[in-house]
Amino acid sequence: MKAYIQITLFNLMIIVLISCDRKSDYIIDSDFEAIEDNGGGTGTTTWTSDKQYLLDGLVFVNDGQTLTIEAGTVVRGKTGQGENASALIVARGGKLIAEGTADKPVIFTCVGDDLEGSVPVMTKGLWGGLIILGNARLNLQTGESHIEGIPFYETRGIFGGDDDEDNSGILKYVSIRHGGTNIGEGNEINGLTLGGVGSGTTIEKIEIISNKDDGIEFFGGRVNCRYVVSAFNGDDAFDYDLGYSGKGQFWLAIQDPGDGDLILECGGGTDPEIGMPYSIPVIYNGTFVGRGSHITNNAAQFSMNSAGKFANSIFTNQSGGIKIEYKDNSSNSYTQFESGNLEIKNNIFWDIAENTAEDIFNVYAGNGTNTTSQNQVFKAYFTQAMNIVSDPGFTISPDYYRLIPLVNVGENMAPLPDSWFIQVNYKGAFGIVNWASGWTLLSEAGYMD
């Protein structure tokens, strides 16, 4: 059967009632295009801001195709679980060019969202999400894998290769809302999934909010991301594994007070666990806000031989601190720490663990081994690496987050690793200007100024 895209177009001004969840119906009264993919992908095309777009099922940008989405365009995903899940997937070799502006962001949301409050801000799992797959390296023996959240029989879900500079397109001023539908057996789609995405891809000013699974997950690759918001998601705010080694700056995480797990889940390899390249992202200027000091979760957890370098950041409002895995007689995250691949330096911690330096950094046993000596070394590293316990002057409540520091947070800054990073005189994601204001749902709904 010949592959094709079926597009149903209502050019007349009509009223379409679409149920998104138990509470909200939505009226679309302009041009409306329902997009179905029967194998041919989107084709090389442009989605324009004067039309409404509805993803009906899994829609792919195939190898060799480029989908351009104009500033101000709203793309909605049809509600459905399992085989009826809806998502936009950029396959290996495809490109997505979604360049919004501060005044006209590109918005991905569920079909029932009128953008005026019809869907409560923290509602999750109403459609799939955005998945981008590339040709950059993974640390698997096979060199490639099949992305989670997509049925295994779909070959366009394969990612990974040998081109770390691979280019999957541009995302700027993009807001991804209310995703994470379940395709079966607890397999939800992340808000933004990046599988083997290369450093030629541009990702800046991105919001992932109220997704049922992780906000953003990196499966290998070397893509760099700056100005990223991950808020109110149902699992981890940021998750990486399979050898992710990109760069990040100005990352904001706000965990849902009633949901969620780790702020940062830091994984290494799986087949094998010690596979190369190692997971060693370099992240500066993050503001990481947890669920509250009374709820048992860690701020960051390193396992499966993972590493990473986090500096000039602020961690706050979480019951657990930084935990790294130790296994006797094998490579692990503690040995990555010993080799210098795992660094947590020049950061501010406040309301983390018991709010003391001795309690924030911990080593845990991955195979039942005694970790007393390793714990002593890692705990001493807290001060050696110029981390401090200090109040940045934030306001944190269930319905409002003021994350512009009220005190000087620019002392003892770690030098920047290279010219990709932007020189600033403060720790955390924000100085005196809130770059998330205006274009994010977090801001529009009043959770931030």
Image: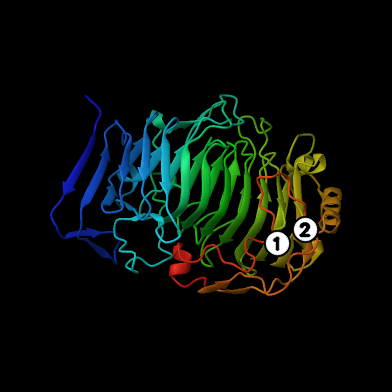
Would you identify the image quadrant in which residue 27 lies? Answer: bottom left
* Residue 52 visible to the viewer: yes
**What residue sits 36% from the left and 46% below the top?**
69
Question: Does the image show residue 237?
Answer: no
Q: Which mark is first along the chain, 2 or 1?
A: 2
Disc ID at residue 427? 1
Which image quadrant is residue 112 in?
bottom left
Q: Nearer the viewer, residue 429 or 82?
A: 429
From the viewer's perspective, tell me whether residue 328 is left or right of residue 244. Answer: right
Q: How many marks?
A: 2
Q: Is residue 164 above or below residue 342?
A: above
Q: Nearer the viewer, residue 297 or 381?
A: 381
Determine the image quadrant of residue 435.
bottom right
User: Would you say 335 lies left or right of 253 here?
Assistant: right
Distance from label 1 to label 2 (Cα)? 7 Å
The crowd level at tag 1 (other Cα within 10 Å; few <14, some 14-19, many 20+) is: many
Residue linked to disc 2:
413
Check contact, mark 1 vs mark 2: CB within 8 A: yes
> Residue at the spot x=71%, y=55% of the render?
322
Image quadrant for the N terminus? top left
- Three-letter amino acid code of the residue under disc 1: Lys
Task: Decide: is 309 above or below 407.
Answer: above
Q: Amino acid at mark 2?
A: Met
Q: Residue at x 15, y 51 (%)?
A: 11
Percent position of residue 270, x then y: 61, 34
